[in-house]
Structure formats: structure tokens, C-alpha cells
């Protein structure tokens, strides 16, 4: 392939680019190198916030994670060796038990276009249909800024699909949105396959009697019990719970597209929503959390799918009593601030409010989208300050201003809170990793939240014992 087809000769040297450099300068170099269109699309889908560089882990952590969870899917990373080394932690942390491919480069191979040729060769070597349905090739910061054109890779080799994505730290704000970058790219590919003719059914089909029912696709990673709970809530409506996107195998993408409607449980999956809407599917925001959330969500599903009003009312009555009972058995009393970067923060906030908590603030690193408006309006109407694209500084300022009985947040927020003697819980591991939907979700977080708030006397005792040692001058 000629050099002019692969990479601009103006590509910056790899040591001049990283995700924490000057964003304007990096974007200017990337535009000169031919990556302007890629970055313009990322900016449109994932607008930045008050902070101009990542404040959490590398965003590719998210796209790599969902690729590693998919059956018969291989991953190749193109980026600086230190970045790839760090990202392989993901495969070990989540027990993927599979290798992560890496194409190394140096200044010469990057600038001359040899890196693209090396990536192309690596993809050809790996494309074995006996082992893989798809290969995901991911450009990290340096290759993206240097204009390495993954769009020129073959769309398939020996029947193995090739999906190229760019996930630079200076272009994708959070790892949660990077999941959407890959999910959206896969949905776009699968949608074209469906348009071209018959496709193969998933290996794990829906349960007996459910395959013929209209299904609701769930958008956004959820606790494993939640899709099961949603299926039970949908059954009285004559509907079934469809796949969860990001999916666990390629064929589930076809099933996800073949749905009656899409429930955007995580409302920031902009690229994925675009593909569903292009396929003619209705997308709904919010989720069935607490009493009011469950009532409104079931009504919205009924409207979208043309379900008779009496059926919707019957389904609501069956669930709302159980939700009220669960909330009454597990009340939460205390002032709380909440922040996180997973995308489910507003749903958790609604559940805390309905559980009786005095919630003052909820911050999410994810953006405000039309599908988040329902939850934002509900919370704001109840006096909760809602901050999208919240920075670490804003989350910490809210915690310090409201002096809560419990701070739920990211690791640095938790650290700050405990330094001040405020009980705190890490959102990702201790809150989002629990069921949230319907009756099961109504009482799921009360135990851990209430237990954490009872630890306040221990914090007071420790502060009194150690003060003023360790305090900032």
C-alpha cells in the first residue's frame, strides 16, 4: 500500500504526544496528520467537561474490558508500550485468560506509515475463523494523533470481522464512554450485515416460549441479576428481556437490533443509540428504580410497544407493592453526597431518595444527554444538585460543603472524605455492583449504606486520637 494512502508525512513523533499534553496542540497535530475527522466525531459524541484532561483511568480501559468479555473476539492494541503494559492489567483483573495483541512501533515506523502496515500484517496473521468471529484493533493516543488510518484495514479476512476504533485519552473523556465507542462500532457493523441478508442466531437463545415475544434490549452494563429482574417485570406485558449491550458474543448484536424498543439504562451510549435509531428502534431513558421509577418506566415501555393500558396497569400493580414493601423494610436515614464515573449515578441517586436518604448532590463524569433528562429533572425537583461532567474538584467541594453522614464516590473522593472523618464508600465496587431494578434493587443498597453511616463514631475516635499528627500544615 502506498505511503500516501496510509499516513501523512506530518505525523508527530511519538514522544511529542500523550493524553495529558496540551489538548489544543495535540488536536492540531492530529488534524495535520489526517485524524481530524476521527476527533471531530468523538467530540460530537462525547463533549468534554470543565476539565480538559482525563481525571480517572485511561478510557481504553473500558473498550478493552468489553472486548475481552466477548467470546471468540481478539484484541490488538496500538499505542505506546507503557500504555499497553498498563492496560493489560485489565485482562488480569477481570480474569479474561486471554492474550492482548500489541503492535510495537518507533519514530521511524510511525512517521513512514510502517506502523499501519505492521498492524495490517498482524490482523492477517490473527484472522483465523476457527478461533475468532471478530478482531478489535484499538488506536491509543499516539497512533490516533499521528493519523494511523484503521479505516483502511480490510473489513473482514477469511470471514473474521475487523473492527478498528480510536480511543485516545485526549478524545474520549471517560472509560464508560469508551465502552460505547466499541459497542457502537460493532452495532454499525452488525446492522450492515443484517441489511445484506440472513444472519446466524446467538448460541445462547432466549428461554423457552420467550423467543417469539417482542424483546427490550438493555443498553449499558448492569449487575448480572438486573436483566433477570427486568425480564420478570416485562413478562406481564407480553415482552421479554433481550440482550444487554455491550454483548457477550457477536451474534447477540443481531438479536439486540431485532427488538421492540431499547432501554438506555446508561443514557450516554451515544454511538450505540445512533445505530438503534438508524435501525428504526425507539430508545427510552431512565430505568425501573424505586416506586416512581418503576411505574414510569413500565408506562413508557407500554407506550413504545403499543401495550394495552390495562396490561400496563396490571404489571405496575404487581411490581409497585413489592417495591414499596422493600423500601419500607430498608429505610435510609442520613445526609449523603454521591459521585461516580460508571453512568448509573442518577439511577442510584433516585433509589437513595426513595429510600428516605437526604441526598444533597449527585455528580457523574458522564455527559448530559436527552436520555438522562428524566432522571435529572426528577432529582432536581426534589432539591438534589445534579452535576454532569463533574470534575474531581466539584465532587470534593460538594462533599466538603454539605458535610454528609456518608460520601459515596470515586477513590479520591473517598480518601478526602475519610481524611475529614466522614464515612465513605467506593461507588464502583460497593454500590454499582448491586442490583438496582425493581423490588430487588429497592432494598439492595440500604444495608451497606446504613452500616457505613454507623462507623462515624470510629472516625471521630481516630481523629481525636491522631490529631494533629498527619494534618496538613
Image (cartoon, rainbow, N blue to C red):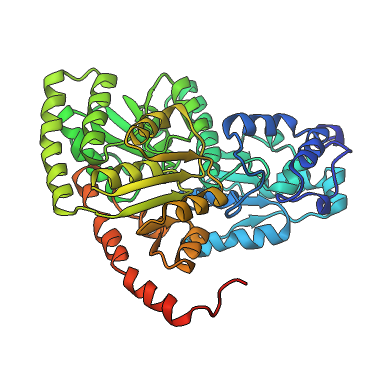
Q: For this view, does 443 lie left or right of residue 274?
A: left
Q: Is residue 151 visible?
A: yes
Q: Quadrant of residue 406?
A: bottom left
Please state the horizontal and vertical placement of residue 468, each as a whole percent of the image: 52, 78
Please state the horizontal and vertical placement of residue 94, each as a whole percent of the image: 46, 61
Residue at 83% x, 34% y: name it: 32
Residue at 74% x, 45% y: name it: 143
Q: Quadrant of the N terminus?
A: top right
Residue at 18% x, 48% y: name it: 327
Please state the horizontal and vertical placement of residue 277, each as a whole percent of the image: 45, 22
Give the number of callouts: 0
Q: Quadrant of residue 422?
A: bottom left
Q: Is residue 97 visible?
A: no
Work out whether 429 lies above or below 74.
below
For the residue pair 322 and 69, the one nearer the viewer reads as 322
Q: Quadrant of the C terminus?
A: bottom right
Please state the horizontal and vertical placement of residue 59, each as a whole percent of the image: 59, 48
Work out whether 86 lies above or below 299.
below
Q: For this view, does 23 lie left or right of residue 16?
A: left
Amino acid at each position: 500500500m502506498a505511503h500516501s494512502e496510509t499516513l501523512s508525512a506530518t505525523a508527530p513523533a511519538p514522544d511529542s504526544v500523550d493524553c495529558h499534553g496540551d489538548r489544543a496542540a495535540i488536536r492540531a497535530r492530529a488534524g495535520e496528520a489526517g485524524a481530524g475527522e476521527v476527533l471531530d466525531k468523538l467530540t460530537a459524541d462525547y463533549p468534554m467537561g470543565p476539565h480538559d484532561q482525563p481525571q480517572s483511568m485511561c478510557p481504553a480501559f473500558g473498550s478493552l474490558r468489553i472486548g475481552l468479555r466477548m467470546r471468540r473476539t481478539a484484541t490488538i492494541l496500538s499505542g505506546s508500550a507503557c500504555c499497553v503494559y498498563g492496560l493489560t492489567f485489565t485482562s488480569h483483573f477481570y480474569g479474561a485468560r486471554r492474550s492482548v495483541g500489541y503492535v510495537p512501533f518507533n519514530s521511524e515506523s510511525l512517521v513512514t506509515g510502517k506502523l499501519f502496515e505492521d498492524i495490517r500484517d498482524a490482523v492477517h496473521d490473527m484472522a483465523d475463523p476457527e478461533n475468532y468471529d471478530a478482531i478489535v484493533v484499538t488506536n491509543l493516543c499516539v497512533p490516533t494523533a499521528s493519523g494511523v488510518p484503521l479505516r483502511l484495514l480490510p473489513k473482514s479476512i477469511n470471514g473474521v470481522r475487523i473492527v478498528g476504533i480510536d480511543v485516545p485519552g485526549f478524545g474520549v473523556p471517560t472509560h464508560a464512554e469508551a465502552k460505547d465507542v466499541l459497542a457502537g462500532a460493532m452495532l454499525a457493523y452488525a446492522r450492515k450485515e443484517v441489511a445484506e441478508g440472513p444472519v446466524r442466531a446467538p448460541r445462547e437463545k432466549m428461554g423457552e416460549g420467550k423467543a417469539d415475544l417482542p424483546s427490550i434490549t438493555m443498553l449499558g452494563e448492569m449487575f448480572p441479576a438486573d436483566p433477570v429482574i427486568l425480564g420478570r417485570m416485562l413478562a406481564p406485558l407480553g415482552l421479554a428481556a433481550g440482550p444487554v449491550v455491550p454483548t457477550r458474543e457477536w451474534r447477540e448484536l443481531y438479536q439486540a437490533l431485532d427488538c421492540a424498543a431499547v432501554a438506555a439504562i446508561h443514557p450516554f451510549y451515544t454511538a450505540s443509540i445512533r445505530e438503534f435509531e438508524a435501525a428504526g428502534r425507539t430508545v427510552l431513558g431512565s430505568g425501573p428504580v424505586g416506586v416512581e421509577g418503576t411505574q414510569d418506566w413500565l408506562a413508557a415501555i407500554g407506550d413504545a410497544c403499543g401495550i394495552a393500558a390495562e396490561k400496563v396497569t396490571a404489571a405496575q400493580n404487581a411490581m409497585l407493592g413489592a417495591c414499596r414493601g422493600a423500601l419500607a423494610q430498608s429505610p435510609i436515614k442520613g445526609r449523603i453526597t454521591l459521585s461516580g464515573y460508571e453512568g448509573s449515578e442518577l439511577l442510584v441517586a433516585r433509589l437513595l431518595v426513595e429510600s428516605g436518604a437526604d441526598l444533597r448532590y449527585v455528580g457523574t463524569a458522564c455527559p448530559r444527554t436527552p436520555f438522562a433528562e428524566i432522571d435529572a429533572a426528577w432529582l432536581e425537583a426534589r432539591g438534589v444538585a445534579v452535576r454532569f461532567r463533574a470534575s474531581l474538584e466539584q465532587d470534593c467541594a460538594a462533599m466538603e460543603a454539605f458535610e454528609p453522614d456518608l460520601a459515596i464516590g470515586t477513590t479520591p473522593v473517598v480518601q478526602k472524605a475519610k481524611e475529614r472523618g466522614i464515612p465513605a464508600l467506593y461507588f464502583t465496587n460497593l454500590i454499582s455492583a448491586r442490583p438496582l431494578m425493581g423490588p430487588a434493587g429497592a432494598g439492595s443498597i440500604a444495608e451497606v449504606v446504613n452500616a457505613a453511616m454507623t462507623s462515624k463514631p470510629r472516625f471521630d475516635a481516630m481523629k481525636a486520637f491522631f490529631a494533629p499528627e498527619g494534618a496538613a500544615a
